Image (tube, coloured by chain):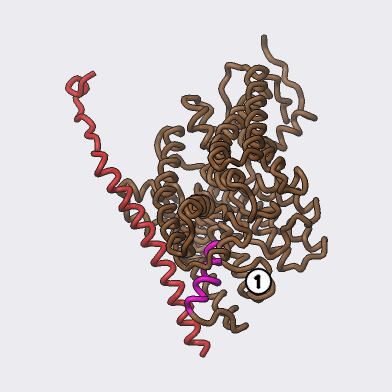
Chain colours: A red, B brown
Amino acid sequence: MSSKETDREPVREESRWRRWGGYALGIVIESAAVGAISLAALFLMYLIKLIAK
Amino acid sequence: MILRPTREDVKLIGRGIGRVILGVGLIMAIPLVVSILSTEWSTVLDFLVGISACVAFWLVMEITCHVKRDLTWFHGLIVASGGWLAAMLFGAVPHFLSGHFKSYLDSCFDLMSGYTTTGLFLLQDLDHASHGLNMWRHLLTYAGGQGIIVIALTFLFAGTAGALKIYVSEGKEEKLLPNVVRTARAIWMISLTYLMVGSLFIWISLLREGMPVVRGLLHSVWLFMGAWSTGGFAPQSLNLLYYHSFWVELVTLIVFVIGSFNFALHYAVWTGNRREIYRNIEVKSFTTTILLGTVMLSIGFGKFGLFTNLGEFFRKGFYNLASGHTTTGNSTVYSVSFYREFGFIAMWAVILAMAIGASACSTGGGFKGLRMGIIFKYLRGEVRRLASPESAVVSEKVHHIQDIWLDDPLVKGTMFIVICYVVIYSLGAMLGILYGYSPSVAFFDAVSAGSNTGLSAGLTSPLMPTLLKVYYIFEMWAGRLEFISIIALFSFGGALLRGRGVRRKR
């Protein structure tokens, strides 16, 4: 059945490059989140060390 | 009234378990190829025997359990829990034949530890294990992380309506895509993409440390599999301590923290919903609890004057805390250090982190961040309700991909699972104490087994009492499947023995 018959817009396929680019960006964002959490933990440790002195 | 299962029910379950075991046999083909390439002929034979046993079992089940009906929810639960037990028994064949184990029970312990991504092991002389055996250990933890049932769904149950039932029964409630088989395939796509990227970075780090190219490649793949699946296996008995490499530790830390995230979160972030990374309740919950753990750890270390510079704190303290919190089990210290060096406060920081665990629908175990978020929000709602006028309507929600409003059934279900975890942790600890271990050590290893972490304070060894080995196997299995399917399996067993027969209309 064509899209005309069903009166719907045809679904536009995302290009492969665009899709894998999205995945790569996802990996970068998730890694950055882990980095941010680790840095926050290090900062806390530093603060506690300072207070304990 | 418990109804006695019919012959057809038993056949349906038998067929399902047979297919899961076929999946196990198919996975064994990969270590078989590695053994052939490494010319380890004795190991080749071990895997050929293992594969033959799996295929033979599947054939017997297909022939004797031929039925046309599809699985119901109850069958799904039994196939999931029974399938894991059968997978343990059949998967342990190459382990036992390798000669690295004291008994078949020890092989089964390692298998269950691998499948459930725990990481505790009773294998002896790990440093001289064959490439094939190492590939099998790491592959089964990688496969177990995605879920044995997910594997079976991907290849063997395609198109059957019963697929959803066994998928959910394995403790994975979320569907990334409308179709459960496509969900299983999406989980594999994410894991395989990370396998390539993560292994590459670990390989570069190992080459930088001077490891030979091929050995470095094998170690990088194995380390990745252990870290990503939050299993914590490593090809050396000293685990990450063997490498003495900051870069290997940094990459594995990133890999296992990302690996502990929910697959639905990965999928959302990868497909354009980038804001989910800081809005998601599980990321918020993990960040909060790991920072609280860091405070406890810093106070504990400060008290005993341990790991005083930031580099040491990061590599010996935070790394192991994060490894425990994500239920990974990779470690940069000796097992006994948790008990002899960390001190009471720091050791309990790691125990609590392990108990809380990773995200729901991830490769990790423990209470899960989602449940911690739900309980916290519920308690906050209760406090707000007390402080508000009687006529006020107070409702709480959590954000996980979408907003979820908290209602009584959701909170009760959450509390039930958390209580089950507390019970298995406590029973394991009490058993350890009864055998004469110190309370902290007994709690450490019992929580580690129940939350599928794999860190050990020195209790877990081939010389530990047999009853503890059996209980830890149960803990790992129950903790991974999150109890419901285990309870269903016990009810099924009870119904077979004592249930009332049902008269069927002809």
Q: Is residue B281 above or below residue B314?
A: above
Q: Residue furthest top?
A: B506
Q: Identify the image quadrant of residue B428.
A: bottom right
Q: Is residue A47 visible?
A: yes
Magenta stretch: includes residue B447: no
Q: Nearer the viewer, residue B398 or B184?
A: B184
Q: Residue furthest front?
A: B39
On-image quarter of the N terminus of chain B: top right
Q: Identify the image quadrant of residue B494.
A: top right
- Count the labels in the image: 1
Q: Residue under circle 1?
A: B337
Query: What amino acid is found at the position of numbered circle 1 in the picture?
Result: Ser
State the image coordinates of residue B167 (x, y, percent, origin top left). Answer: 53, 36
As helix, strand or loop, the secondary structure at mark 1 comes to helix
Q: Is residue B100 left or right of residue B206?
A: right
Q: Is residue B426 left or right of residue B345?
A: right
Q: Residue at x 22, y 22 (%)?
A: A6
Q: Nearer the viewer, residue B75 or B125?
A: B125
Magenta stretch: includes residue B313: yes
Q: Is residue B435 left or right of residue B160?
A: right
Q: Is residue B85 left or right of residue B430?
A: left
The part of the chain drawn in magenta is B310-324
Q: Nearer the viewer, residue B409 or B223?
A: B223
Category of crowding for the residue at label 1, using alpha-carbon neighbours closer than 10 angstroms: few (below 14), some (14–19), many (at least 20): some
On-image quarter of the C terminus of chain B: top right
